[in-house]
Amino acid sequence: MVQVQLRVPEGTVREIDQWVEKGRFMSRSDAIKTIIALYEEKEKTRKFYRMLSKRSKEAKEKPEKLSPLEEV
């Protein structure tokens, strides 16, 4: 792991500290890593949704190119 320094609003740090006190996370570091992982997952979901939307549009424009699910 690489250590980084970042500036975070005091209110955010207090909230993270409360989460740690309540046992939701083991440490500030754990909370921040989890938040970043959730953001990355959300971005992957958005990318997948955009791909599905594009494919849906393509399917409407060119239905003859669709393959039946049974063949997939």
Image (spheres, rainbow, N blue to C red):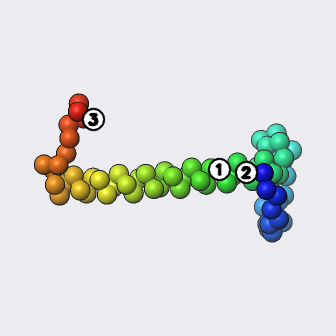
Using the rendered image of the protein, determine whether residue 41 is visible from the camera's viewpoint. Answer: yes
CB atoms at circles 3 and 2 under 8 Å apart?
A: no
Of badges 3 and 2, the one in the foreground is 3
User: Label 1 is placed on what type of residue?
Assistant: Ala
Residue occupying image coordinates x 27% and y 35%:
72
How far is mark 1 from mark 3, CA to CA? Answer: 31 Å
Secondary structure of the residue carrying tag 3 is loop
Q: Residues within 10 Å of mark 3 (few under 14, many from 20)?
A: few
Rendered location of residue 1, percent (x, y): 78, 51
Q: Position of residue 45 (x, y in %)?
A: 49, 51
- As drawn, the label of residue 33 is 2
In this rendering, does residue 11 appear at all?
no
Label whose residue precedes the other's in the sequence (1 or 3): 1
Residue annotated with mark 1: 37
The residue wearing badge 3 is 72
The foreground one among 20 and 66 is 66
